[in-house]
Structure formats: structure tokens, C-alpha cells
Image (cartoon, helix red, strand yellow):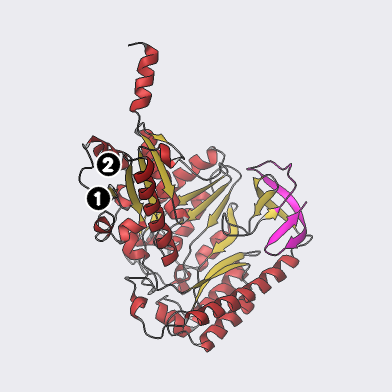
Amino acid sequence: MSAKAKSTASAKAQTTVGLISLGCAKNLIDSEIMIGCLQKAGMVMTPEAELADVLIINTCSFIDQAKKESIDTILGAVEERGQSRPRQKIVVAGCLSQRFRQELPSLMPEVDAFIGLDQITTVPELIRGLQAKDGEGEQENLVTATPKFIPDYDTPRFRLTPSHTAYIKIAEGCNHPCSFCIIPKIRGRHRSRTQESVVREAEALVKSGVREINLISQDTTYFGMDRWEDARPNPRSGVDSSKGESLASLLRDLDQIDGDFWVRLLYTHPAHWSDELIETIAQSRTVARYVDMPLQHISDRMLTAMRRETDGAYIRDLVRRMRAGIPGLTLRTTFIVGFPGESEADFEELVGFIHEAKFERASVFNYSKEEGTRAEKFPGGIHHMTRKRRWNEAMRALQHEFEEFNSKQVGRKLRVLVEKPGQARSEMDAPEVDSTVFVPENLAVGQFAQVTVKDWRGYDLIAE
């Protein structure tokens, strides 16, 4: 056989894989890891589902809307396969398969395999096994009851984000008992990576040209604390670094990396903030003066019902301490309205707090009753029209504060990271969820630039 013929035969023998990634940035990293492992195994990725020998759907099931999107995507893929690609294998991964690991196989017999969080690095072996079967074969369900996996700095990964920005998952799972949330049952207990592992990954990213590192997990502020002997520090009295690694010690190490970049904190929990962490951010060269801290409510009644481990007085004091300790801080938060038992007084207190705290970035969610959560069976459900009205009112309050804040930015000089020609993000803006700074189109994409704000439109700024 000629060399050309051998090459053609080898190309035909390669497995082609398509991947659809749904959900949040944490799920995106799982997709990136799967792609990295597939490429390392010699498999070829394709963005066109109809060309794939195997189609992986990495699902989300955090709330009903995400669950519906995941199910619709799976059923759509099954229908398309039946019409035009009968030999294609379909693999369902991610939170939906993890959450409903016992129910899905019988509900979706057309799916060839279900995998959970523990199988994302072994997906090439699964695919080889599926292809080795004659005919349709038996459905595979490899989802483990309690996931244990966490990535390391050398875990294969192919980034799907722009070359100048990246996410680092510093921990997996969650220990919080929030009554509205299903994530701990899906992702398991909190388990942190080592500080060395995170720093080595960050060093490699910066060396490759990344200008923005977004630290994520279900609760970034709990980083390292799961390995302490006393795993429940008192945030009011500060964190004793002698106990072991913490988010503060991680940020200090990241600050030593050579290069011009931002480190951004996403998904922090108010219960684990400390004066040490506030001081560390204030003194850091690289950490953006931006904090994402979902608060969910301010009413003591609602915080207790939600099992948020904080009360209104603590939250107000924490916000005050953060603003005093970190000059120029941008605070992003989220709230839930329409939670079971929420009274008009509770809601009015929340709206008052929005105006009082003047969050620079925020969003509001309508309560979604999730199967398997404590709140699922709570009495005092709120009528859907009342939930809608409260959402509208809370969003109007937030919009008022955003517009007042943006009007004060006119004339201000900002350092921005250029995302694409004519569009950038400031230190105040996380990828995907926050505002855009419109800039001259000749600024280099993927680089920092200094601009001056000359106007604003709604949530966005216009600069020159």
C-alpha cells in the first residue's frame, strides 16, 4: 500500500466527535477537559453534529429552564440521528445525567451512554467501547452516585474561550445547605485543588498570552478550608492562615506570577469572607477590584428559610467592610424573588437594600422549585403573577442604580480588555454576564488599553 493510501485509510479510521456544551462556565471547563482527552487519544473534533461518529451533549440541570434546554437538545439529536445518521452514537454527560442517573436510562433508551463528572477524562475509552459493539448493543450507564473528580494543572484541556481569557476551576462540589439549590446533590461535597496545582495552571495560561484568569467553583471563598481540621472558620474574626491554604493565600501566590493580567473572583459566598481576604485583594497587583457574591436576599426570614448561613445584619456589615477595605470595588450579586413564604414586607426590604447598597452589577431570578431540594415541599408558594411583578420591580430598582452609576462614569479613564473589534470589558465586567465598553475598532483584540468614557447607553459605556 502506498504512503498516500495508508494516510487515507488512517484518516478514515479516526473517530470524529461532536460536542454540545450547555450551562455555566463550570460546565464549560468539563467540556474543555473532555475535548482535551479526546484529542490526546487521537480523535478528531467537529463542530458539525451531522459529521460526528459520536455526539456528546454536556448538559445542565440547575433550574427548570436549563433542564428543559438539555432535554430538548438530547431529543433533537436523537431525532436527527434517526433521520440522517443512524450509526451515530449519542453520549449524555454533565449535570442532567448526574442528577437523574437512575431515571434517564429508561426514559431515554435511544441514548447510547450516560456519563457523570467522574468519567470526563475517560470518555475516549467509553467511545472505543461503544464503537466495538456490533449493532446497537446494550446502553451504558457509568454515572457514579457521589462524584469525586477534580481537575489538576496537567489534566488535558482544550480551551473554548477566546485566547486572552480563561477559567480555572479551583474546587468542585459544595457543602452549603441552601434549601433552593440542587448543586450539592449533583456535584458532591466541596473538594479543593492544591494551591500549587492552581498556581501552575495559572502560570502556564499567562505564559500562553492569557490576560484574564477567572477563578471559579461552587464557592471560591471556601477554597482550601475543606482540608483544615477546623473546617468552619468564623469570618467575623478573620481567617487564621496557619490552618492551611485559603483563597487569600492562593491570591498572594498568584500575585507573584510575572505578567500583565487580571485575576477575577467569581461565585464567592458571603459566609466565608474575612478581613484577611479583603486586605489581600486591596494589596494585590493582579486581582481585579471586582467581586461576584450572590446574596439571594436580605430579609432575615428569607435568609433563614433559604438556609444561607448569614443574616441581614451580617450582610450589611460585610458589604460595608468590603467597600471600605477595597477602594473602587465593583460588587456583583444575585437575588431570588418569589421564594415560598416571601411577604410583601420581605420583598420591600429587598428593594430598599438594592437602593441602599448600590450594587454596580446585579441580576434577579424568579424562584424555581427544583425537585429534590428542601424548598420543594415548603408551604407558602407565591402566585406566578406575583413573582413576575416582584421580578419586574426588583429589576427596575437595579436598572435605576445601574443608570445612576453609569452616568457618573462619563469622563473617567478606564483600563479595558479588548474582546473583539470595537468591544471591550473593563475591570468591572466579567465575561458573558456584565456590561460592554464600546471602543474604537482599531484597538488590538486580546490586549489591554486605556480609554476615556464619553457616554453611556443603558448598561453599556461608550469610550474613546
Residue under pointer 2: 126
From this viewpoint, is residue 189 visible?
no
- Residue 2 pos. (x, y %): 36, 10
Looking at the rendering, which quadrant does residue 217 occupy?
Answer: bottom left
The span shown in magenta is 438-464
Q: Residue at x 31, y 70 (%)?
A: 372
Distance from the alpha carbon under mark 2 to that under mark 1? 9 Å
Residue under pointer 1: 142
Residue type beneath disc 1:
Leu
Report crowding for label 1: few under 14, some 14 to 19, many 20 or more residues within 10 A (C-alpha).
some
- Is residue 327 placed above or below 298 in the rendered structure? above
- Residue 111 pos. (x, y %): 29, 50
Q: Residue at x 41, y 59 (%)?
A: 223
Element type at marker 1? Answer: loop
Q: Residue furthest front?
A: 83
Q: Confirm whether the magenta stretch covers residue 458.
A: yes
- Residue 254 pos. (x, y %): 51, 49
